[in-house]
Each structure stands twice: as structure tokens, then as C-alpha cells.
């Protein structure tokens, strides 16, 4: 069975996120506006005012309240959606950890932006890194259509009985949040159909009047360890689940994204460039150009950052001669970028090949075609056995 | 890795309810002194019960008595009692287990 073709409209990434949430019929959709995601809140309010979306929208006084509201709604058995960015994300940090610990299947869209410290109203993935160890599932997307599709898939993933975890859907703030592209909006009845399997599963416990329950209150010694263990196991289960849901989405709607990672011309590639988000699109163009010059280069787009797709990455990278990683964030206290340092833990399984870290695109600086061409050239030289520099902050050289 | 631990929680998350998987700490074991009532002074006003942090005061009809399985011996009941009917007595003076 296949979905009918939906209407195609030109919209921003923020609008795509709001459309996706609306199509999933949330019970509660609340967020506190912050640049560059404010339009998500505006668009959701418009849907609500127009009677298109029958969700409770709580007027919150900040992001911390927003996360508490959606967590509570989730514990009461509701479908909950919120969105934020940077300062907002870190302002809800305790509530963020609580949502994960409560195993509340909240879905949150994040327009990635630099984090506090240096006042930066600009793009960067540092907010993903700042919340890396929050116990959430973190998925990073590349374009507006992928934002919309991934949010629908995120509800399937979060609310799956085997998973029961909150999911962040990340997209580049400023770049994707404000970029208007043609986006196919699936018909709501088809989205209903896609989410329907959740109703056939056993149902998670929920708070309801007359049946008092407590959650997260009794983390004592071995009970605590048990719950932490279950949480970590659920994250591991999410890896295969995201691939399954992606395949099912492709079958039904005709669009697939590869699940945990997206591989582009990696099959016969000798060297690999790994990156994420919008930079993957530019890298794809560079891969084509360099292939025309005879360089056997491929792209791995990291779609899932937590849980880290160990098996898929090892499979994609094993036997390659050199790997370059472009990070749009820094790993404080390490020499390379965060995705680079994570990937390095896989070297014993991949093989001890040169791995080069590139830090680029902080604070809305562009990760340009010449930048990526340079990365390909240097990684290629390293693959030929030439000496290389481990870490490069591209715009600073 | 083989997990030998038998799961306490039936659910994925930390749901608990009083009938199934409520985990109770043996807070009584923390106690170094316990409240002892002079019933002649008690007028059953209920302030001790109201102020008790773990809410372990049991209503006995004409006075309140702390549930020694949970009473941590904090002494707040004795401090609040307007008639001085409660005295904190060191545990060493009792032979029975709380």
C-alpha cells in the first residue's frame, strides 16, 4: 500500500517542522519562541487558531516550563511536541534529563544554534553537543523535506513500545530554519495510517485520574541501576528501529533517508568524508565534482548522533584508506570535533587509517565548496601515505 | 553480559505504585532517637502528625504514634508539640527493633 501524493508547497524549515507536528495530531504542542525556531511556534498557533490542529497549547513562561508541560502530557499518555534552540535548549536542561529518565516519548524539533558563552545569534551544532548525554535520541537532518518526514518518523520511533524515549530532530538554524524549499506535505490520513501500528502495540503506563502513580521517584541503589540499564538498552534498540521505520516510510511515502546514516557513493570509495546536516548537501556536490576528477571519494551523512550508529559506520568505513570528519561544533577538552572523537573510538574495528578532523561553520560561517574540496584533497593525500595534520579549524588557517 | 538481577520494575520507566513496585526505603534504620509520648500531656491536637516529614504518624484514636519502620527520629514532632508531650529518647535505651 502506498500513500497518495501530497500537496507540494514552498515553505521554510520551521514551517515544515510545524506542518509535521500538526499532521501527527499532537495532544499537546507547546513551545517558547526563540530565534531561529520562533516560526514553529507561530505556525503551530496559526494551525490551532484556524482549527486545523486540535491540540492543547499551553502558554509557558520559558523553555523549562515547556519541557515540563510536554513531559507531563506524555506521562498522561498524550502525544506531545515542542521545539527550541540553543539558549532555550540549555535552559530546559534539567527538564530535558527528566523527560529522558521518565522515558517520556516527547518529540522536539531543534533549529541548531551556537550556545551561550559567546553571544552568538548564529548557526552551529553546539547545542546538540551540549545535550549529547541527556539520554535523548538525536537525529540530524539535511533539508526541509527531511525535517517534515523525520518528525513524522520520530513519533513512530519515540512512542514505539520497545523504545519509549524522547527524540530530538535537529536541523541547521538560520540555514534550514529560514530556507524556503518545495516540500511535499503528506495527506493527514496517510500520516494517520503510517502512525497506526503504534495503536496495535501494548500501551505504556499512563497517569490517569483515580489511579495514583509515581514516576522517577524511586531510584534507589539497584533499582536505579536497573532503570539506567533499561534506558541504555532502549537506546541501542533504537538503532535498528530507526532503519526499520525509515524503510517503512520509504515504502509508503516514497522517500527514504537511510536511517542511522546515509551513504553516498561509498561502495567503491577509497576515502570518505563524514559530516551531518546541511553540510552533507554541499559535500554531495563536491563528491560528484571530485569523482569527475577521478578521486574515489564518498560521503557518509551521520543522521543519528545518539545512539551512535557503531555497526552501520563500521560497515560503511571498513577498508577505506582515509576518513575526514567535518564538525560544526567543538569538543571542549578534546583536540578534534565531537563527531571525530566519537568516530575515532571505532578505529580498532575500521582499521588504523588516517582520520582527519575539520572544524568549520561555527557561528553561521559557511561550510563552502572550496572548504570541502580542500578536505577531500587533504584526506586523499593522507590516504596516499603523505603526512597530514590531525585537526584543522578551516577558516582560521 | 548475563543479567542475573531480577527486574524490580515491570515497566521500562520508573513507574511505581503503592501496590506493585513502590520501593520503600528503610528510613527507620537511620534513627538514633525516637519520640516517646507522655499520654497524660497529649490532647490529641494532631500537630505532630501535621509536621511529620515522612508522614509516618499513625492515628490511634486519642493520640498519635510514629510508625517506627519509617520514623527517622528527626525530632520535629517533639519540637512542635505545644504541650511538650513528646520526648526524643536515644535508641540505645530500647532493646526492640523499630
Image (cartoon, coloured by chain):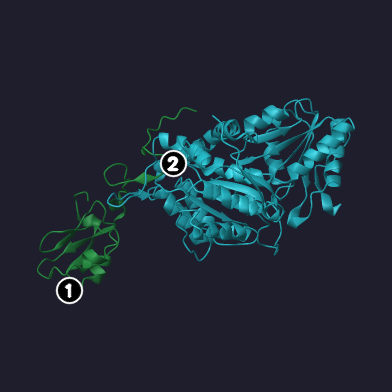
Q: Residue A350 versus residue A239: which sits nearer the camera?
A: A239
Residue A315 sits in quarter? top right
Locate residue A282 relative to residue A307 in the image: left or right. Answer: right
In the picture, the disc for residue A227 is: 2
Name which quarter of the figure residue A243 lies in: top right
- Determine whether the residue tagged by mark 2 lies in a helix, strand or loop: helix
The residue lying at 75 percent from left, 42 percent from top is A281
- Name the residue that disc number 1 marks: B83
Examine the rendering and report whether any part of residue A130 can be seen.
Answer: no
Q: In the rendered view, does A309 fall on the left or right side of A319?
A: left
Query: Residue sitting at 60 percent across and 47 percent down?
Result: A169
Out of A181 and A211, give the one closest to the viewer. A181
Q: CA distance from mark 1 to mark 2?
A: 47 Å
Q: Colour of chain B?
A: green
Tell me if residue B30 comes above or below residue B12 in the rendering.
below
Mark drawn on residue B14 = none
Q: Nearer the viewer, mark 1 or mark 2?
A: 2
Decide: few, some or many residues near mark 1? Use Cα within 10 Å; few <14, some 14-19, many ≥20.
Answer: few
Q: Residue A379 appears at what percent x and percent y?
A: 83, 36
Q: Which of the chains bears the disc numbered 2?
A: A
Q: Is residue B11 above or below residue B62?
A: above
Q: Position of residue A363 (x, y in %)?
A: 74, 57
Callout 1: chain: B
Which element type, helix, strand or loop, lies under badge 1? Answer: loop
Amino acid at each position: 500500500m502506498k500513500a497518495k501524493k501530497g500537496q507540494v508547497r514552498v515553505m521554510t524549515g520551521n514551517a515544515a517542522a510545524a506542518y509535521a507536528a500538526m499532521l501527527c495530531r499532537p495532544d499537546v504542542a507547546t513551545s517558547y519562541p526563540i530565534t531561529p525556531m520562533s516560526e514553529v511556534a507561530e505556525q503551530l498557533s496559526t494551525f490551532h487558531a484556524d482549527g486545523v490542529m486540535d491540540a492543547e497549547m499551553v502558554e509557558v513562561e520559558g523553555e523549562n516550563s515547556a519541557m515540563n508541560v510536554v513531559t507531563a502530557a506524555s506521562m498522561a499518555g498524550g502525544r506531545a511536541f515542542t521545539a527550541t534552540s540553543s539558549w532555550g535548549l540549555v535552559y530546559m536542561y534539567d527538564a530535558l534529563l527528566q523527560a529522558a529518565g521518565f522515558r517520556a516519548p516527547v518529540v522536539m524539533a531543534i533549529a541548531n544554534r551556537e550556545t551561550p558563552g559567546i553571544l552568538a545569534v548564529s548557526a552551529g551544532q553546539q547545542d546538540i553537543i551540549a545535550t549529547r548525554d541527556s539520554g535523548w535520541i538525536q537525529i540530524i537532518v539535511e533539508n526541509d523535506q527531511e525535517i517534515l518526514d523525520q518528525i513524522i518518523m520520530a513519533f513512530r520511533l519515540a512512542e514505539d513500545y520497545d523504545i519509549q524515549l524522547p527524540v530530538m530532530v535537529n536541523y541547521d538554524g538560520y540555514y534550514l530554519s529560514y530556507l524556503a524549499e518545495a516540500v511535499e506535505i503528506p495527506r493527514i490520513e496517510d500520516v494517520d495510517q503510517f502512525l497506526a501500528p503504534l495503536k496495535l502495540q501494548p500501551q505504556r503506563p499512563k497517569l490517569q485520574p483515580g489511579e495514583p502513580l509515581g514516576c522517577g521517584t524511586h531510584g534507589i541503589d539497584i533499582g536505579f541501576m536497573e532503570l539506567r540499564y533499561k534506558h541504555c538498552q532502549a537506546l541501542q534498540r533504537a538503532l535498528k528501529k530507526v532503519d526499520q521505520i525509515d524503510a517503512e516510510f520509504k515504502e509508503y511515502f516514497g522517500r527514504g533517508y537511510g536511517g542511522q546514516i546515509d551513504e553516498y557513493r561509498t561502495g567503491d570509495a577509497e576515502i570518505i568524508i563524514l559530516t551531518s546536516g546541511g553540510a552533507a548537501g554541499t559535500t554531495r556536490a563536491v563528491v560528484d565534482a571530485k569523482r569527475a576528477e577521478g578521486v574515489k571519494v564518498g560521503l557518509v551523512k551521520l543522521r543519528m548522533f545518539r545512539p551512535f550508529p557503531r555497526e552501520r559506520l563500521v560497515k560503511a568505513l571498513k577498508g577505506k584508506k582515509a576518513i575526514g570528519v567535518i564538525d560544526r561544533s567543538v569538543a571542549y577538552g578534546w583536540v578534534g570535533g565531537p563527531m571525530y572523537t566519537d568516530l575515532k573510538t571505532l578505529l580498532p574495528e575500521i582499521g588504523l587509517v588516517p582520520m582527519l578532523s575539520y572544524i568549520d561553520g561555527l557561528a553561521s560561517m559557511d561550510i563552502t565548496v572550496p572548504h570541502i574540496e580542500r578536505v577531500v584533497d587533504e584526506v586523499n593525500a593522507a590516504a596516499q601515505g603523505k603526512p597530514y595534520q590531525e585537526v584543522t579549524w578551516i577558516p582560521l588557517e | 553480559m548475563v543479567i542475573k538481577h531480577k527486574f524490580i520494575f515491570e515497566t521500562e520507566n520508573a513507574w511505581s505504585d503503592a501496590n506493585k513496585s513502590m520501593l520503600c526505603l528503610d528510613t527507620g534504620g537511620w534513627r538514633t532517637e525516637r519520640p516517646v509520648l507522655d499520654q497524660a500531656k497529649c490532647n490529641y491536637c494532631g500537630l505532630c502528625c501535621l509536621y511529620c516529614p515522612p508522614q509516618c504518624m499513625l492515628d490511634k484514636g486519642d493520640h498519635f504514634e510514629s510508625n517506627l519502620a519509617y520514623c527517622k527520629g528527626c525530632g520535629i514532632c517533639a519540637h512542635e508539640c505545644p504541650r511538650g508531650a513528646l520526648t526524643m529518647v536515644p535508641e540505645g535505651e530500647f532493646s526492640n527493633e523499630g
